[in-house]
């Protein structure tokens, strides 16, 4: 079944829709029955929502997990996207119904961590904000946040994160679009700290930079989440074929589609969660062929034998995988 045709189990109501910053709109989603509780979620969780134009989009829940009366999400209106975010921002208003999935978490806090360092880029603040809100007055461990954005007026949740009680923990930096004003993350990542876990959410460029700088950290201490799902076409993308080693079934993966989407469309069960190459749920054994890896999970020594089907493509004409 095509992902856009998937039935979503929750029908909620938009309790409020308001501008959070330039180009970013916040939605508060509540049960149709005001006395009902929503399914529980944990900090870092996301939901899928169906936009008024029928498209499915994934958004992190940014509200406190202790509050089961609402799910709060923030939507950045993407002018160059496929239209899902524009439909939500332009067509969805207070009182409107909206179909929503159950919460899923591919970016969960490690409760055993001795400290947390959060790195958020732009709208990537949303899952991290839920984590911070979940701490309340008694955090699980010491934490600090570096929040990067281009412009102040396009930065969501500024008032909350600039509150007096958070000033010693939160650094907010605006580059104004000037590469010479980019924030230097190296002092934060130069020396691995025992028990500290890094959580990074933002653009692919930011996450790749953090991954490169933190190559000497244990992979168990590094956590990534992308707000952009896999499948975005690149100029040099080309179709390729994928074959299942167990059955011999073979499918073409067009430009703009992922292996995972093609498998699901053809009724093949394949595990997934984030669909952005950051959680590792769709890790699959690569039997034959050369993959074009686009994930944030695999170690260099794993790239010849593993693939993340939610984002990665092929450099060879055929990939053989073993689900």
Image (spheres, helix red, strand yellow):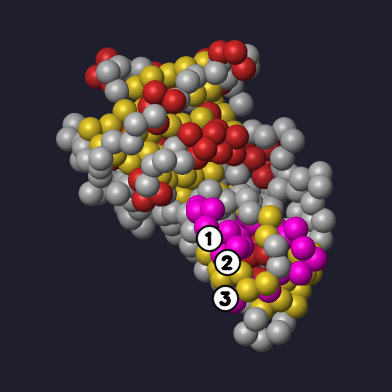
Residue 52, percent from left and from top: 66, 48
Please state the total of marks drawn on the protein image: 3
Q: Secondary structure at mark 1?
A: helix
Residue marked by disc 1 = 302
Q: Would residue 167 be seen by someone viewing this image from the given angle?
A: yes
Q: Earlier in the sequence, mark 2 or mark 3?
A: 2
Q: Position of residue 130 (x, y in %)?
A: 36, 39
Image side of residue 243 versus residue 282, left or right: right
**Point 66% across, 78% down: residue:** 244
Q: Are marks 2 and 3 in contact (CB under 8 Å)?
A: no
Is-magenta flag for residue 299? yes
Magenta run includes residue 205 = no
Side of 169 where 154 appears, left or right = right
Asked whether 251 or 39 is in front, the reply is: 251
Using the numbered discs, state the Cα–Cα distance from disc 2 to disc 3 in whole angstroms: 13 Å
Tell me the quarter of the image containing the C terminus: bottom right
Q: Position of residue 33 (x, y in %)?
A: 39, 54
């Amino acid at each position: 079944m095509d992902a856009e045709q998937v039935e979503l189990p929750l029908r909620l109501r938009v309790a409020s829709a308001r501008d959070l910053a330039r180009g970013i709109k916040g939605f508060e989603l509540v049960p149709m029955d005001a006395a009902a509780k929503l399914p529980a979620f944990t900090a870092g969780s996301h939901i899928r929502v169906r936009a008024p134009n029928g498209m499915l989009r994934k958004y992190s829940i940014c509200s406190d997990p202790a509050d089961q009366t609402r799910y709060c999400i923030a939507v950045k209106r993407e002018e160059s996207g496929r239209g899902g975010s524009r439909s939500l921002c332009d067509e969805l208003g207070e009182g409107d119904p909206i179909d929503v999935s159950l919460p899923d978490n591919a970016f969960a806090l490690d409760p055993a961590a001795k400290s947390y360092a959060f790195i958020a880029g732009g709208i990537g603040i949303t899952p991290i904000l839920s984590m911070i809100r979940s701490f309340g007055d008694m955090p699980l461990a010491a934490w600090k946040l570096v929040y990067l954005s281009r412009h102040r007026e396009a930065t969501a949740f500024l008032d909350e994160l600039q509150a007096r009680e958070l000033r010693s923990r939160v650094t907010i930096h605006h580059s104004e679009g000037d590469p010479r004003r980019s924030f230097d993350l190296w002092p934060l990542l130069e020396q691995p700290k025992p028990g500290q876990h890094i959580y990074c959410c933002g653009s692919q460029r930011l996450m790749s930079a953090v991954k490169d700088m933190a190559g000497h950290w244990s992979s168990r201490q590094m956590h990534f989440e992308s707000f952009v799902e896999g499948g975005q076409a690149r100029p040099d993308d080309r179709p390729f074929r994928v074959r299942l080693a167990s059955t011999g079934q073979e499918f073409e993966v067009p430009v703009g589609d992922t292996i995972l989407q093609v498998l699901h469309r053809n009724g093949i069960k394949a595990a997934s969660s984030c669909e952005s190459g950051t959680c590792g749920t769709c890790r699959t054994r690569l039997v034959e062929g050369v993959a074009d890896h686009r994930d944030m999970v695999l170690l260099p020594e794993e790239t010849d034998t593993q693939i993340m089907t939610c984002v990665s493509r092929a450099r060879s004409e055929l990939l053989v995988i073993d689900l």
